[in-house]
């Protein structure tokens, strides 16, 4: 009986390991597909990414960082890569384990990705120096772990009141396009939000450390 019980436990453990491995493979396949869709949407076919590589991890795709276990994409850094066009839904928002996103100093247009709220692990977001316009998506304010945001050098306009976010807020100039954006502050002792440059950014920094 004891031997039979141990055999059953071993089989259950093996089954669990197989299921976990399959889930991890599915997650990475989804991340890989999202990255390729983003590349195609913003004219990034010149990026040194090999679509035939089984995984974007391990330095195979420059600018892409992965978890220690290599099963999820956690960083995407593509500053100054001559990317242009809008970021479609189902690309960045599908990278649900992403912690750092930097697409600064490109020519990305449209708005802040509408499904950015899907990046529930996001800590740092830098989309500065692009051609983004419009308001901020509600999903941006649902990211409880977000600490650093730089959206300066865009054409963001509109407003998001503190009442809608349930958090403190302040107004800054909305970039070269003018307008005012009320910015929600993530909870915790360390956070930075920058939506404009010059005097407005300095005023925002003063509020942040107050």
Image: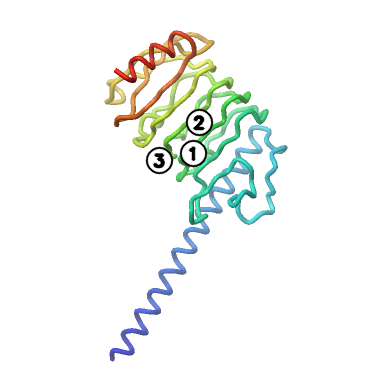
Instruction: Label 1, secondary structure: give it.
Output: helix
Quarter of the image where one finds residue 1: bottom left
Q: Name the residue nearer the viewer: 86 or 50.
A: 50
Look at the picture and state if 42 lies above or below 57: above
Quarter of the image where one finds residue 173: top left
Residue located at (45% from left, 9% from top): 179
| Disc 3 to disc 1, C-alpha distance | 9 Å
Is tag 2's residue or tag 3's residue first in the polypeptide sequence? 2
| Disc 2 to disc 1, C-alpha distance | 7 Å
- Dot in front, 2 or 3: 3
Residue 16 picture location, percent across and down: 40, 69
Query: In the displayed structure, does residue 14 sit left or right of residue 144?
Result: right
Is tag 2's residue or tag 1's residue first in the polypeptide sequence? 1
Is tag 3's residue or tag 1's residue first in the polypeptide sequence? 1
Residue located at (62% from left, 25% from top): 106
Instruction: Label 2, secondary structure: give it.
Output: loop
Query: In the displayed structure, does residue 183 sit left or right of residue 86?
Result: left
Residue 162 picture location, percent across and down: 30, 20
Residue located at (38% from left, 79% from top): 10
Q: Are marks 2 and 1 in contact (CB under 8 Å)?
A: yes
The label on residue 93 is 1
| Disc 2 to disc 3, C-alpha distance | 14 Å
Residue 35 picture location, percent across and down: 59, 43
Dot 2 alpha-carbon crowd within 10 angstroms: few under 14, some 14 to 19, many 20 or more? many
Q: From the image, tell me which residue sits under label 3.
A: 120
Instruction: Label 3, secondary structure: give it.
Output: loop
């Amino acid at each position: 009986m004891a031997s039979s019980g141990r055999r059953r436990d071993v089989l259950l453990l093996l089954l669990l390991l197989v299921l976990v491995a399959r889930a991890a493979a599915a997650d990475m396949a989804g991340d890989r597909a999202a990255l390729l869709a983003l590349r195609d949407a913003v004219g990034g076919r010149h990026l040194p990414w090999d679509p035939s590589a089984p995984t974007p991890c391990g330095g195979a795709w420059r600018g892409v960082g992965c978890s220690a276990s290599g099963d999820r994409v956690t960083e995407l850094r593509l500053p100054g890569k001559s990317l242009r066009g809008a970021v479609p839904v189902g690309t960045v928002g599908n990278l649900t384990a992403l912690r750092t996103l930097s697409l600064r100093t490109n020519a990305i247009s449209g708005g802040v990705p509408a499904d950015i709220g899907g990046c529930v692990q996001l800590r740092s977001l830098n989309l500065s120096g692009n051609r983004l316009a419009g308001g901020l998506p509600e999903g941006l304010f649902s990211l409880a772990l977000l600490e650093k945001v730089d959206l300066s050098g865009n054409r963001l306009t509109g407003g998001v009141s503190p009442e809608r976010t349930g958090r403190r807020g302040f107004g800054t100039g909305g970039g070269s396009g003018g307008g005012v954006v009320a910015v929600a502050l993530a909870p915790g002792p360390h956070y930075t939000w920058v939506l404009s440059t010059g005097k407005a950014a300095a005023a925002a920094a003063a509020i942040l450390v107050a």
